[in-house]
Amino acid sequence: MKTLFALGVWCLLFVLCWPLALLALVAWPFVWLFSLPFRLVGITFSALFAFLRALFMLPARVLGGGRVATA
């Protein structure tokens, strides 16, 4: 759905201003390459925060806190 929306917006831009649409089409791989390190940093920080949360919640889980088990 997201890809279809992007294609529709690009077609609309192509109809309204074709040089800008072609520039966007050529520049998109470079924008993707530029944003790749930022995505990797985001994934790393997300994993780090998940690890820290699991580490801080470990004593509560060991002592029986958290979810209630149904018998």
Image (cartoon, grey):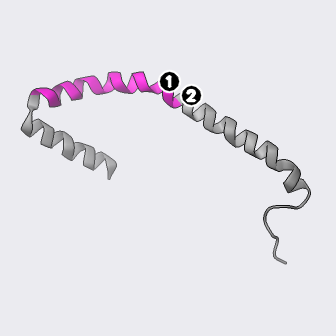
Q: Which residue is drawn at 68% across and 35% down?
A: 48
Residue 63 at x, y percent in the picture:
92, 57
Image quadrant holding the C terminus, namely: bottom right
Q: Residues within 10 Å of mark 1 (few under 14, many from 20)?
A: few
Q: Which residue is drawn at 84% across and 49% down?
A: 58
Q: Residue at x 81, y 70 (%)?
A: 68
Is 48 located above or below residue 31 in the figure?
below
Q: How crowded is mark 2: few (under 14 residues within 10 Å), some or many (20 or more)?
A: few
Is 68 located above or below residue 60 in the figure?
below
Residue 26 drawn in magenta: yes
Residue 50 lies left or right of residue 66; in this view the side is left
The quarter of the picture where residue 40 lies is top right
Q: Which residue is drawn at 82% across and 71% down?
A: 69
Q: Which amino acid does label 2 sit on?
A: Val
Which residue is tagged 2?
Answer: 41
* Secondary structure mostly seen in the magenta stretch: helix
Residue 56 at x, y percent in the picture:
81, 45
Residue 36 drawn in magenta: yes
**Span colored in magenta:** 19-39
Tell me whether circle 2 and circle 1 mark residues in contact (CB < 8 Å). Answer: yes
Which residue is tagged 1?
Answer: 37
Q: Which residue is situated farthest in the right direction here?
A: 63
Foreground pick, 2 / 42? 42
